[in-house]
Amino acid sequence: MIESKPPANPNLLSRQALAAPQHAGQRFDQAAAELFSDFSRSQLQQWIRQGDLRLDGRIVAKPNHKLAGTETLSLQVLLQPHSEDRPEAIELDILYEDEHLLMVNKTAGMVVHPGAGNASGTLVNALLHKFPDLHTLPRAGIVHRLDKLTSGVLMIARSDAVRLRLIEQMQARQISRSYLALVWGQAAARGTIDAPLGRHPVDRKRMAVLAAENSQAKPAVTHYRVLQNNVAVSLLQVELDTGRTHQIRVHMQHIGLPLVGDPVYAPRKPQQRSKPATAALTAEAYAQLLAFARQALHARRLVLQHPVTGASLAVAAPVPEDLQQLLNSLGFESSSDTEHGARHNA
């Protein structure tokens, strides 16, 4: 459980969280990363060493300190501008904006956060240019992530209090996240995939379904239903109960329905597709499927309770041109509720 009180100084971050029995024997920084999941582990390690993140009010400046599982973790730190992230004049497609919250339509190919090999051209760089006040917020206020090659709606908080409320809504499964996914294969009408995920035991850049008893496994639940399909491919609406890295991509591959164009989890060679299935496609459609240069995944809609006003808020991102052209070649139509814009209900 995380508690947060609005501080007199808006840049002063103050939080508490209670360790649980499952944290017994865990490293201080590992447990902190689970309890304060909106911060990176490296940032939390820094705060531990500085004494900003304490155990039962005591400074324990060793990130590898083992917990008993009964402690109170308290964080109090003055947030500073993130000078290492440079503002850049990059065009943003803003779907919704008010003084508390932003919703943007991330294009496929844009990295969300700067990192190794991606110091510029990211969504963070673009946000810091258009909204300089986001400099003091961790990750420029971005509440959740999309993979580089996934398009669609992303939430950005404009204060830490709002950011925390949105994270709490996500953890309580009060935010509906709906995706369009085009997968290889003929899917059942609807289904639920309940399979824990974690880092691949060999390839650390990949995620994998792990046994539930594996200490690295985290619960992951994905729901899907078929919008349109043929014997070769299926267009799905996918909704998440959890938000693990690569969750949709790994879960769909796990049940034999890998995403079209997925460079990591789907085979791309024609001979790896069954002849009866591909025979149902026109030569043009099959060629476009094989040539699609990214995973065919679009975060099309977010529905939530506004973290300040309490009003119902639904924001949708239009289907991007590359995916729409692919759907057209298959004779598929995208769902009507992907229209650009936002809807508000009091």
Image (spheres, rainbow, N blue to C red):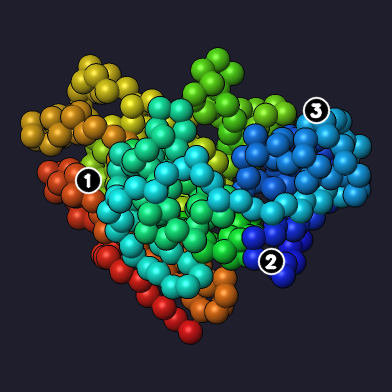
Q: Front-most of 200 and 12?
A: 12
The disc, 1 or 2, on the residue closer to the chain's N-terminal end is 2
Question: Residue at 63% of width from left, 45% of height from top?
Answer: 39
Q: Which residue is mark 3?
A: 64
Is residue 190 visible in the rendered image? The answer is no
**What's the distance in space between the residues labelled 1 and 2, CA to CA?**
45 Å
Position in image of residue 7 (x %, y %): 72, 67
10 Å crowding of disc 2: few (<14), some (14-19), many (20+)? few
The disc, 2 or 3, on the residue closer to the chain's N-terminal end is 2
Whether the residues at callouts 1 and 2 have beta carbons within 8 Å, the answer is no
Position in image of residue 120 (x %, y %): 37, 38
Position in image of residue 190 (x %, y %): 42, 50
Whether the residues at callouts 2 and 3 have beta carbons within 8 Å, the answer is no
Question: Residue at 81% of width from left, 42% of height from top?
Answer: 51
| Badge count | 3
Disc on res. 312:
none
Q: Which residue is mark 1?
A: 323
- Taking the image as shown, residue 167 lies to the left or right of residue 110, namely right
Q: Front-most of 129 and 257?
A: 129
Position in image of residue 304 (x %, y %): 51, 67
Q: Front-most of 319 and 188?
A: 319
Name the secondary structure under disc 2: loop
**What's the distance in space between the residues labelled 2 and 3, CA to CA?**
31 Å
Disc on res. 9:
2
Q: Nearer the viewer, mark 2 or mark 3?
A: 2
The amino acid type, in three-letter code, at marker 3 is Asn
The disc, 3 or 1, on the residue closer to the chain's N-terminal end is 3
Question: Residue at 70% of width from left, 57% of height from top?
Answer: 13
- Taking the image as shown, residue 32 lies to the left or right of residue 169, namely right
Name the secondary structure under disc 3: loop
